[in-house]
Every structure is written in C-alpha cells, then in structure tokens.
Amino acid sequence: MNFAFHRFLFEFVPIFRSIRVPARWAMVANLGLALLAGLGALALAETLRSRLRRGAPLFWGAVAALLLFDLHHAPLDLYAGEADPDALTRKLASLPMKGGLVELPSGGSRGNYVYVLRAADHGKPLVNAVSGFGTHEAGRIDVLSGRRPIPDELLDLFESIPVSYVTVREAWLLPDEREALRAFLARGVAAGRLRFQGRFDQRTRADLYAVAKSEPDAPEGRPLPYSVEGEPAPPARGAEDLSLTGSVDGPEPDAVIHGPLLVRGWARIPARISASRS
C-alpha cells in the first residue's frame, strides 16, 4: 500500500483512488497480460501470413475457439450476499422491475454498503449503489432526502431515472429522519405517485413502495402502517419506542424460546454508537 509507485498514483491520479486495496492491481496485471497475449497472437499471425497465404484466417479462427473454450464455465458460481436474506430482500427478488431500486435511508454515516451486499441476493438494479464512489443520481438522492422537509423534487427524480420501487427500513432512522421521511412518503401516497406494498420485516420495519409512473401495474396501495395527519397507526406487534433508533435482531417476533433467553440487538446513543449483547 505504501510502495512509492502505488502511493504516487493514489495521491496524484484521481482515477486510481478507486484502487484502495493493493490486491486490485490484479485487474491492471490482467490487462497487461491480455495486451501481451494479443501482441503475441499478432506476431504469430504475421509469421503464418508470410509462409502460408491462407493460414491467417485459420489461425484467428483457432484463437477464437481457444478463447471460447478457456472462458467457458458452466454452471456459473453465483454468490449470495448473506446467509439469510431478510423477507424484504426475498420479496424484491421475486418482483419484475421496469426501472431501478432505491433503498432508504441513503448515505450518511451508515452508508449504502448493506444495500449493495443485499443486491447480490435480489439481483435488481440498485440506483443508490456505491463502490468507493457513487453516481450523480445517488448523490442527488442523498442530498434531497437529507433536506427538511424532504421536497417533492425527490419524487420527480425517482420518476425521471426511472425508479420502480423504494424501500425504507424505519428502524435505521433517527427520529427527525423518520418524521421527515414519513411526511414525504405520505404525500406521495396521497398524490397517487407512490403505492405502499406492505411491511416485510418487523425487526427493521422494512417497508416497500412502488413508484406508480414506473410500475403502473403494481398492486393498489395498502394502508400505511403509521399515523398520517393525526390518524392513529395500526397496532404494532410488540412494544417499540420510536424516540430511539435501534433494533432487536433476535429472537424473532413470536418465537418460542426453550432454555436461557439470548437477546441480540443494537441502539444508537447521542454522539456514539453502542452495540449490546446480553
């Protein structure tokens, strides 16, 4: 990592800032090997052309066949993002999408890397994905969703990209984030631009919304699981304090426990993050 050549490129050539791990130099090495192989094949072809008038086409055909044989691999080894995808991820995997997917909350200290990990499970195009750096669209989503109140310009952006579905994991939101995002989503639902598709995980309170313009055939929206304009929210399963930000990771709701009870989870405390296992 501190070798002079790598350090020089990292510091002074912007594109190399995406190579944060030295092992990724393997991509540069593979490119060099490919160029050398191409130059070698070209030299062989010129030699055959000088000795055999019709040897070059046969040679290039043989090279193409060898490449296809070397690159052939079936079945493909596909790797899942995690051992146990949550219910929302499994739902996304089963949904046909005409556009992309946006997962909220986006950006901030949490980042979007969990969403990228889960994309290996559902296989849908993730609009606010990141890999060392984000896209212009992902940056706009972070900026607009961070404003108070969240402007309807964010909905305009969803429709223009286009975005098919929006997910929200409420347990990951701070109280002010939750209030602002609920107001924004409620306006979208009331205007018919969003359709609430359901809550698919009680632990993270993982909600799914369809963008009506991109997915006109999505099912009609269900009632929102939280209060809107003073209306009481549906009764929740278990007790929760929305003034706190955290989650109980285990045991699952309604689980039957035999023996010692082990509760796993996390909670965010002002100015620091504390993980607890007891």
Image (cartoon, rainbow, N blue to C red):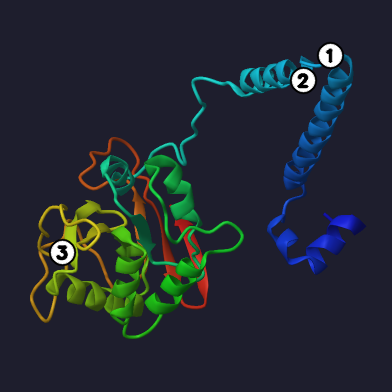
Classed neighbour count for the residue bearing mark 2: other residues with Cα under 10 Å, few (<14), some (14–19), many (≥20): some
Q: Between 39 and 25, which is closer to the camera in this rendering?
A: 39
Between 36 and 189, the one nearer to me in the picture? 36
Q: Which mark is residue 56?
A: 2
Mark 2 or 3: in front is 2
* Amino acid residing under circle 2: Ala
| Label whose residue precedes the other's in the sequence (3 or 1) | 1
Quadrant of the drawing holding the N terminus:
bottom right
Alpha carbons under labels 2 and 1: distance apart: 8 Å
State the residue position of label 3. Answer: 225
Residue occupied by mark 1: 52
Residues under labels 3 and 1: Cα distance? Answer: 77 Å
Please tell me which residue is depicted at 75% across the width and 18% down the height of the picture.
59
Say whether disc 2 or disc 3 marks the residue closer to the N-terminus: 2
- Residue 102 spot, x, y in % from top left: 37, 60
In the displayed structure, 204 sits above or below 269; it is above
Q: Nearer the viewer, residue 249 or 56?
A: 56
Choose top left, top right, bottom left or bottom right for residue 148. bottom left
User: What's the residue type where badge 3 is placed?
Assistant: Pro
Q: Amino acid at mark 1?
A: Leu
> Does dot 3 land on a helix, a strand or a loop?
loop
Residue 67: percent from the left, percent from the top? 67, 23
Residue at image x 30%, y 46%?
A: 92
Q: Position of residue 91 (x, y in %)?
A: 27, 44
Q: Secondary structure at mark 2?
A: helix
| In-image side of 148 versus 256 (left or right) | right
Q: How many marks?
A: 3
Q: Secondary structure at mark 1?
A: loop
